[in-house]
Amino acid sequence: MYNLQKIKALTIVETLITLLAMSFMIAGPIFFISRSFSYSHYLQKKTIANSLAQEGLELVTSWRNNSTTTFSSTVDSVCLNSSCAVDWNGSSDIPTLRSCSQENESCRLYLYSENGIQMFRHGIGTEASPYLRSLNISKSGNAYIIESRVWSEEDPIFKIDVKLKKIIYAL
Amino acid sequence: MLKNGKNKIKAFSLVEIIISLAIFSFIFSIVIGIALMLVRAQSKVQSQVFVTQTAQTLVNDMSQSLRYGYAYFGGDRIQYTNSGYKIRLENKAIAKPGDLDIQQNQNCIQSNGTLNCSLVSPDTEITNSQLVNNRQDSPFIVFESKDGDPYTYADQNAYCIGPRSDGTMTLYKLETFKEIETNGSYVEDFCNSSSNSAQDMIPDGINLDYVSFDVNGQSSENPTNPMVRVKLKLTSEIGGEILIQTTITQRLVQIL
């Protein structure tokens, strides 16, 4: 027969402490792994953003290479007083430049798909990508200071904001 | 705990042991499950990072080579695939920007007096497969490297998609082409595992879903503004996928 008076058991405090300790043991690694996931996604998005920002600089450079006169007149009229978006259709000799605002969606890049191949384009494509790209250009004599910015606010904790700068001369 | 009244022997009852084992098994399975989940998650994170780093390395390698290379050529995706991932070039001189000696080379001057190194392969498998300076969505890009000899195509470089021996697709880099025919008038190579010179640029475990080059080499005679857009998508069973895109502008141009 059991002697109910002499049965030892854990108190509620002991039980709660045990549960708390176990919760920490489980939650710690899970938190660590979830942060690792977030960082790897962040790294991936930043790599993509970096390539897109580099593309922005290269497209402006190609415009300058094509004709310094046209480059100067277009940039002066379109990009000196506001941000602008640069885009290339893949076949024309020069990219296109148009103004865009960093405050709204006009700088957003879209995923355009053709024959199963996806690419990031401005103003073409049905699927909005998480990335926005703008060029901020200032001028000093014949030198143009180009800042290509790609950003994404999809994740409020890990915001992507890549800014690459380059000075090109329109001599 | 059961106490025997006569001998005072303490022991666990069968029920106690079964309940204890059940609780232990339950907790143990939870702990093991969590541990396995953590290991899998960590492996996935590492794989994701690896895919990202691979994509970055590929883009950097292509950017560096293409930026200082010249005489870009692309081709048709379907014809390239049907030919068994073969690139064949007519072996003749290449125009290097600003190099008048080469531009005056009769091998590269066409009837209209302008230099045009666009090549038509005579191979029946790739009839009408034309390597052209300007091609959207090309599965490969052929170019002269910075230190290459512009008088021959045998040392052309190429980035191209092709199959591995296990059937998965990868990105190959070619740095030499084999001369064929008795007089060496053509060079060719394959972008697949059968080629001795094709270097697999992507580590095992990562596959190339696609690579697409928008080649804008313009005319070889007067390439004022050559540029190439590269789009590639890498996939890994564990690490997921990454779509990366960039554009490379040639640095050898003479600004007008």
Image (spheres, rainbow, N blue to C red):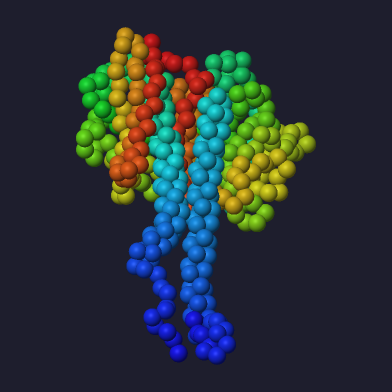
Q: Nearer the viewer, residue B197 or B190?
A: B197
Instruction: Identify which residue is drawn at 42% across, 78% down.
Output: A7
Name the side, left or right, on which A92 lies relative to B121.
left
Residue A140 visible in the shown view: yes
Report x, y in % for residue A14: 38, 64
Q: Is residue A37 above or below residue A81?
A: below
Q: Residue placed at 52% from the left, 74% from the top?
A: B25
The answer to whether any part of residue A109 appears in the image is no
Q: At 69% across and 34% down in the image, what residue appears? A: B176
Tell me residue A122's x, y (percent): 31, 39
Instruction: Name the quarter where the C terminus of chain B is drawn.
Output: top left
Image height of B235 relative to A162, above or below: below
Q: Is residue A68 above or below residue B84?
A: above
**Looking at this view, is A55 or B56 the one in front?**
B56
Q: What is the x, y in percent for residue B219?
A: 49, 27
Residue drawn at x 56%, y 33% is: B61
| Image quadrant assignment for residue B106 | top right
Residue A146 point in image, percent of width and height: 35, 22
As drawn, the residue found furthest toward the right would be B182
Return the residue found at the far front: B6
Q: Nearer the viewer, residue A48 or B41?
A: B41
Q: Residue furthest top?
A: A141
B105 or A39: which is nearer to us? A39
Q: How many marks?
A: 0
The answer to which quarter of the image holds residue B141 is top right
